[in-house]
Image: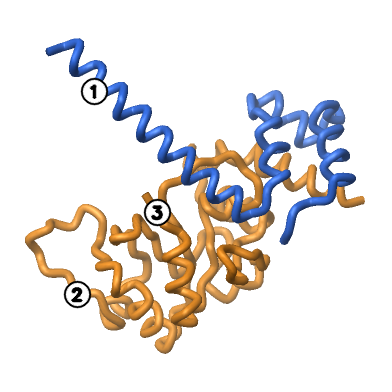
Chain colours: A blue, B orange
């Protein structure tokens, strides 16, 4: 499973921007799913998508540690 | 945090029969879902248990939350005695499942999988259809919340392929 073609990604962009009424895409949008993230992920290979997850988790951990430190300093 | 490169390399090099399921599979298909562990479904065949035990042994697996002062032996027999294992290892948390609700045992999961290229290896990953079945069957709130995105993803991939 490699990267999707530009032509296919273009089609995906259209499906996401203008979801067909009654479609699952429309339902997901209504549910509050940020489909632009989905479109962005589909530009990557599966390996790149997994690597991004790991990076995102690392970033969240860093952010929460910084928050904790900051709150602790304030309370000390 | 999980180091999937090392885990996958160990599984493949030891010729473990496995399929990636759960959050990593979701992510691999394009979902925005974030996960910190690696979930795999594995074959319960005796020879595979031996390979699986050997694959993870270098990473000191222990059940998550298991008291540090208690002895835990990681070997083929331990795998034989259980089915599902939630492990902490030196390369992160790894969950081993003998069966996936909504899909079935390893052979069913394998049949519902697709092959993707990860870190230089060809790896089996549960398909979007399989993930939908698993999430619906699991039925927990966290599983059900994934469904709208996954259903949209399936639709997008099908319709963009026409």
Residue B133 at least partly seen: no
Q: Alpha-carbon neighbours of circle 2 within 10 Å: few (<14), some, or many (≥20)?
A: few
Q: Is the same chain shared between marks 3 and 1?
A: no
**Residue tagged 3:** B2
In the picture as drawn, the residue positioned furthest to the left comes out as B69
**Left or right placement of residue B99 versus residue A6 in this view:** left
Q: Secondary structure at mark 1?
A: helix
Q: Tell me which corner region of the image, top left, top right, bottom left or bottom right, holds residue B129.
A: bottom right
- The residue that appears at 11% across and 69% down in the rendered structure is B71
In the rendered image, is residue A14 in sight? Answer: yes
Instruction: State the residue at coordinates (76%, 36%).
Output: A24
Q: Position of residue B98 (x, y in %)?
A: 44, 70
Callout in the foreground (3, 1)? 1
Q: Secondary structure at mark 3?
A: loop
Image vertical order of residue B136 relative to residue B68, above or below = above
Position above or below: B51 against A15: below
Q: Is residue A43 left or right of residue B88?
A: right
Q: Which residue is mark 2?
A: B73
Name the chain under label 1. Answer: A
| Closer to viewer: mark 1 or mark 2 | 1
The residue drawn where x is 79% and y is 48% is: B157
| Residue A50 picture location, percent across and down | 55, 50
Q: Which residue is mark 1?
A: A69
Chain of the residue under label 3: B
Q: Counting other residues with Cα less than 10 Å from the Cα at mark 1, is it few (<14), some (14-19), or many (20 or more)?
A: few
Are the residues under badges 1 and 2 in a single subunit?
Answer: no
Describe residue A74's horizontal placement relative to residue B32 as left or right: left
Q: CA distance from mark 1 to mark 2?
A: 38 Å
């Amino acid at each position: 499973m490699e990267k999707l073609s530009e032509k296919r990604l273009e089609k995906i962009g259209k499906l996401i921007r203008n979801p067909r009424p009654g479609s699952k895409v429309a339902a997901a949008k209504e549910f509050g799913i940020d489909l632009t993230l989905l479109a962005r992920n589909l530009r990557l290979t599966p390996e790149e998508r997994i690597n991004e997850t790991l990076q995102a988790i690392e970033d969240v951990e860093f952010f929460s540690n910084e928050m904790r430190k900051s709150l602790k300093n304030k309370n000390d | 945090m999980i180091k999937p490169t090392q885990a996958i390399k160990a599984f493949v090099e030891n010729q473990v029969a496995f399929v990636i399921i759960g959050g990593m599979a979701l992510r691999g298909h394009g979902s925005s879902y974030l996960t910190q562990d690696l979930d795999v479904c594995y074959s319960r065949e005796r020879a595979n248990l031996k390979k699986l035990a050997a694959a993870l042994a270098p990473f000191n697996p222990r059940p998550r939350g298991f008291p540090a002062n208690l002895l835990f032996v990681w070997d083929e027999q331990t795998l034989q005695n259980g089915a599902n294992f939630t492990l902490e290892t030196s390369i992160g948390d790894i969950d081993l499942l003998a069966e996936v609700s909504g899909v079935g045992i390893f052979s069913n999961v394998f049949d519902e999988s697709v092959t993707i290229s990860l870190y230089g290896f060809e790896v089996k990953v549960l398909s979007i259809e399989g993930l939908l079945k698993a999430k619906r069957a699991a039925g927990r709130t966290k599983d059900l919340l994934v469904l709208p995105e996954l259903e949209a993803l399936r639709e997008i991939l099908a319709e963009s392929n026409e």
